[in-house]
Amino acid sequence: MRKILDRRHAIVAVTCAAATALTFSACGSDTGSQADDASPSFTFASGAETPGMPGMSPTAMSMPGMPGMTAPTEAPAAPAAANAVNIDNFAFAPAKLTVPVGTTVTWTNKDEEPHTVASSDGTFHSPGMGAGSTYTYTFTEAGTFDYICSIHPFMQATVVVTP
């Protein structure tokens, strides 16, 4: 029995030594390889190439208490068209939209969570809208139309329709 255990220990030791040798040889560089001090770069969908870690930008602000670390800056939300409302960060933007009678308003969900657009008087109610979905409604009468997201009722906004 002792011979079997000694043999198994020897096999394990040889296997570990071989794995270590392979690891070191894979980590080494030859004369034709890229320099070891080169930073990786990432190309984002926007086409911007940023050296370093993904999501980090050269114009990012510094993080207090963490020397050498930066936080990504948030891009401002694109302004909504005159007849459009963006749903972003669990809010309707703009929160108050004024349009003339006959205008078709388009709501676009820019959140990852589903949302709805539901008027408090029942005039209009969208189905659940996933990320990137839109809902349109044409206002044929003047008035003030308060609405919410029926999934997240704290989200509130108003469309004012002028004659």
Image (cartoon, rainbow, N blue to C red):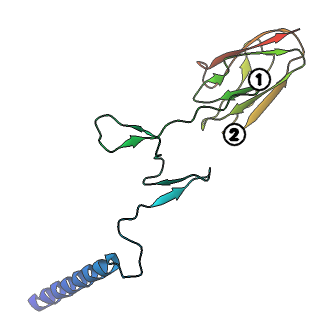
Does 36 sit above or below residue 131?
below
- On the image, the x and y values in percent for residue 143 come to 82, 8
Type of the residue with mark 1: His
Residue of label 1: 125
Q: Is residue 113 visible?
A: yes
Name which residue lies at 46% across and 46% down.
Answer: 58
- On the image, the x and y values in percent for residue 54 come to 47, 52
Secondary structure of the residue carrying tag 1 is loop
Closer-to-camera residue (70/125): 70
Q: Are marks 2 and 1 in contact (CB under 8 Å)?
A: no
Name which residue lies at 41% across and 77% down.
Answer: 33
Alpha carbon separation for disc pair 2 and 1: 18 Å
Q: Quadrant of the N terminus?
A: bottom left
Name which residue lies at 66% across and 32% down.
Answer: 78
Query: How many neighbours does mark 2 have within 10 angstroms: few (below 14), some (14-19), or many (20 or more)?
Result: some
Residue of label 2: 132
Name which residue lies at 64% across and 34% down.
Answer: 114
Q: Is residue 77 toward the left or the right of residue 3 in the image?
A: right
Closer-to-camera residue (126/65): 65
- On the image, the x and y values in percent for residue 81 come to 76, 27
Type of the residue with mark 2: Gly
Does 109 sit above or below residue 50?
above
Q: Quadrant of the C terminus?
A: top right
Q: Quadrant of residue 76?
A: top right
Closer-to-camera residue (132/33): 33
Q: Is residue 29 toward the left or the right of residue 86 in the image?
A: left
Q: Is residue 144 toward the left or the right of residue 40 in the image?
A: right
Tag shown at residue 78: none
Query: How many neighbours does mark 1 have within 10 angstroms: few (below 14), some (14-19), or many (20 or more)?
Result: some
Closer-to-camera residue (98/67): 67
Of callouts 2 and 1, the N-terminal one: 1
